[in-house]
Amino acid sequence: MAEHFARSGRSSVGIEWEVMLADGSSGSLVPRAGEILQALAERTAAERFTVTGELLTNTVEVTSGIGETVAAAIDDIADAVAAVRTVTDPMGVELLCAGSHPFAQWYDQQVSESTRYRSLIERTQWWGRNMMIWGIHVHVGVDDVTKVFPIINALSIFLPHLQALSASSPFWAGERTGYASNRVLVFQQLPTAGLPWPLDDWAQFEAYLDDMTGTGVIADASEVRWDIRPAPRWGTIEVRACDGMSTLPELAAVASLIQVLVEHFSRELDAGRQLPRLQPWFVRENKWRSARYGLDARVIVDSTGRQVPVADHLRETMRHLEPIAEQLSCAREFAGLEAILTSGASATRQLRVADAANGDLRAVVQHLIREFRAGPTLRDHLASLGR
């Protein structure tokens, strides 16, 4: 089947942030998305951002407009969250974000009425009902369809880096899992989710779609749920590998890294250089290592099997790509990566809180609520950097 890849602005950015809804006192998830969306529908109709439902009624997703810069997209996200709060604050509903809720149980959650989601649950059953997961999706515009799969394959080298920076699901259904990101391993249980197939070009992707639609596995390209996938409708590469980010500055930092990497690889292709690529078995091993160990993982960084600490490789990459961040006007957001490397990702903070509270996971939820509400706005964070 012919699948058209839309035109988009090169390295333009769009961001989606899945946000939990919780009772302010108990921290338990609450199924209030329908009421919130109904209350916001008219007043946000003309905004750049959108607020929509998700698989579970305990979640809303806030989505930016298309921005030329990460800052523009993040401003949209901040405006969307502020709009949601005008409804949730009077309800006594709090907002928080992480890859998983520390103690929620799947059987207490309600599935949205959407036919698409109902069909997903009907097919996937127990695994589908266990999708108590929250993430971010970052779209970056690509100016030539021939670049899409070379860039996706090169980005796969940095999938563990992105997972480690965003890792925020060390607990699952009240249990300490021993993983920095339990979410990424749960999510890959869905059909068509997980690592992208190592395709060479767009024609191979169209052949894949032919096979999958012809056998009834999917209805269209939107049901391809890879960790990194093409989004033909928007003309973007969409990175879906990350856990939900717990604060806005961290969201901005990770989004800037994705934007800079895509632009870097696009420039390499423009210069006629071949992009790096890892053996699929190394990519799979790296995904597991970063899910297990987060920023303490050692990852395989080239086809010879060279292994280095993921944090060291991130810093090396950041030094190399800083000029591109400057040119894309996201240098301040990009600099925020160092704060995550220095103080740890959300998973580390959650574990510290749990230890201090003698394992009481209600304290972890309240910590996440405070971070989401009282943590610095992106503007405040950037001002503190003095840039």
Image: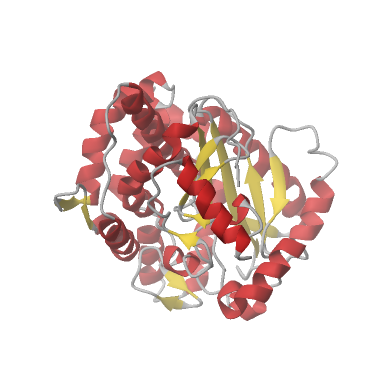
In the displayed structure, 75 sits above or below 200; it is above
- Residue 269, by quadrant, is top left
Image quarter where the C terminus lies is: top left
Tell which residue pokes out farthest to the top in this image.
Answer: 327
Residue at 63% across, 42% down: 63
Tell which residue pokes out farthest to the right in this image.
Answer: 42
Residue at 46% across, 56% down: 243
Q: Is residue 371 visible?
A: no
Q: How many marks?
A: 0
Q: What kind of colouring is applied to the model shown?
A: secondary structure
Residue at 74% across, 59% down: 33
Q: Is residue 281 left or right of residue 333?
A: left
- Residue 163, by quadrant, is bottom left
Task: Give how far across and how far down residue 84 sits, in percent.
Answer: 71, 47
Which of these two is toward me, 331 or 158? 158
Which of these two is toward me, 256 or 237? 237
Task: Give how far across and how far down residue 239 sits, in percent.
Answer: 47, 46
Which of these two is toward me, 349 or 126? 126
In the displayed structure, 97 sits above or below 238; it is below
Task: Give how far across and how far down residue 146 sits, in percent.
Answer: 44, 33
Residue at 24% across, 50% down: 310
In the displayed structure, 300 sits above or below 112; it is above
Task: Give how far across and how far down residue 291 sits, in percent.
Answer: 35, 62
Q: Is residue 278 left or right of residue 48?
A: left
Q: Is residue 128 visible?
A: yes
- Residue 116, by quadrant, is bottom right
